[in-house]
């Protein structure tokens, strides 16, 4: 009951972009112990290990993934509650939206920016996801993770270096759970920030299948604005297109494959390089 596994599981079923070939081994542990055992099993046999949460910031190639993909879900990974310190404890498999709702129900504010993020806690920690001017690590108190030696450890916020969309310590250590802090607030204030975040998102981001923003913002001009200025909004490769709503989103217009998305990414990068001398870097993990 602690783990389930499948062979050749199509990754398009596990990414919000809805593209990507099969994962050779697909493993779903429900406890931290089962997760540690799965990683250990693979490492002992030289099987490459990747951890995938909601797959909302991920582009899997059409050839799929060789080795194991571990997907923490349910059980301990799905736990989310407020502890005695008034902090919110959440497993790696908890949706950010759920984390925000648990905080809201306990009248803890500061999580409203997470309302529209499709990703899970594990992925948000790994990449220091952010929106509306706040980043995941602004609210982290501590992170519990599986380290490279197979030990489960906890580090406080001060012991972790979090950068814009990157957390070095979580590249080879896998986040299992984290403790988050917010501020006690009134339900009215929380609701109004929640609504504000939703309105801003709905007005500026597409609802079609995507992996969120494709590129990191390169210095002064945000990537979306740059793509817009380059006249690339709406352009297509196969069934993938640059969103008409936001230039930094590539959307699946139905039946796209990863190759379509990759061609579009290359086209954007090459035009940004050629016309503006800007080297765009993907924010989405490929
Ligand atoms: N803009 C355009 N044209 C476009 C898109 C944007 O001119 O097609 C302009 C906007 O008008 C605005 C500026 O570019 O003046 C910035 O746009 P926006 O406010 O949408 O923010 P962003 O920098 O593009 C960032 C995050 C988003 C997050 C939003 C909202 C990155 C790469 N992106 O986008 O995160 O949701 O702020 O806070 O940092 C994600 O990580 O996947 C993501 C979507």
Image (cartoon, rainbow, N blue to C red):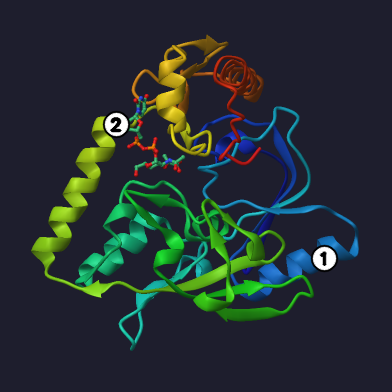
User: Which mark lies nearer to you, 1 or 2?
Assistant: 2
Q: Do the residues under discs 1 and 2 have CB atoms within 8 angstroms?
A: no
Residue 194 x %, y %: 21, 53
> Image height check: is 69 above or below 21?
below
Q: Nearer the viewer, residue 29 or 135?
A: 135
Q: Is residue 150 left or right of residue 242?
A: right
- Of the two numbered discs 1 and 2 on the same chain, state the one appearing first in sequence: 1
The residue where tag 1 is placed is 41
Q: Secondary structure at mark 1?
A: helix
Q: Secondary structure at mark 2?
A: helix
Quadrant where the C terminus sits is top right
Q: Is residue 103 left or right of residue 191?
A: right
The part of the image, by quadrant, that contains residue 150 is bottom right
Residue farthest to the left, as pictured: 188
Residue 247 visible at all: no
Residue farthest to the bottom, as pictured: 84
Q: Residue at 56% x, 20% y: name it.
A: 272
Q: Nearer the viewer, residue 269 or 140?
A: 269
Residue 72 x %, y %: 59, 60
Disc 2 CB within 8 Å of nearest ligand 1 atom? yes
Residue 107 x %, y %: 19, 72
Residue 226 x %, y %: 45, 24
Q: Is residue 238 left or right of residue 135?
A: right
The residue where tag 2 is placed is 204
Quadrant where the N terminus sits is bottom right
The part of the image, by quadrant, that contains residue 170 is bottom right
> Image height check: is 12 above or below 234?
below
> Image height check: is 131 above or below 46?
above
């Amino acid at each position: 009951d602690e783990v389930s596994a499948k062979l050749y599981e199509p990754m398009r079923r596990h990414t919000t972009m809805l593209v990507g070939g099969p994962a050779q081994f697909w493993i779903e542990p429900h406890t931290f112990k089962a997760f540690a055992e799965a990683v250990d099993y693979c490492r002992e046999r030289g099987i490459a290990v990747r951890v995938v949460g909601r797959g909302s910031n991920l582009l899997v190639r059409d050839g799929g993934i060789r080795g194991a993909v571990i997907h923490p879900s349910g059980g301990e990974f799905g736990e989310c509650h407020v502890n005695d310190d008034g902090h919110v404890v959440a497993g790696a498999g908890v949706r950010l939206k759920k984390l925000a709702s648990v905080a809201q129900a306990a009248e803890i504010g500061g999580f409203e920016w997470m309302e529209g993020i499709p990703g899970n806690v594990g992925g948000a920690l790994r990449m220091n996801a952010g929106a509306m001017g706040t980043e995941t690590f602004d609210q982290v108190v501590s992170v519990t993770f599986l380290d490279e030696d197979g030990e489960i450890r906890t580090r406080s916020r001060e012991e972790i270096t979090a950068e814009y969309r990157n957390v070095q310590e979580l590249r080879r250590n896998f986040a299992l759970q984290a403790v988050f802090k917010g501020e006690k607030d009134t339900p009215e204030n929380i609701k109004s920030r929640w609504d504000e975040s939703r309105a801003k998102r709905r007005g500026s981001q597409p609802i079609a299948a995507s992996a969120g923003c494709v590129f990191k913002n390169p210095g002064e001009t945000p990537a979306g604005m740059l793509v817009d200025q380059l006249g690339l909004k709406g352009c297509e490769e196969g069934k993938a297109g640059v969103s008409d709503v936001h230039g930094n989103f590539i959307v699946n217009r139905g039946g796209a494959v990863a190759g379509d998305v990759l061609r579009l990414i290359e086209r954007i990068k090459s035009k940004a390089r050629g016309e503006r001398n800007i080297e765009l870097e993907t924010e989405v993990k490929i």
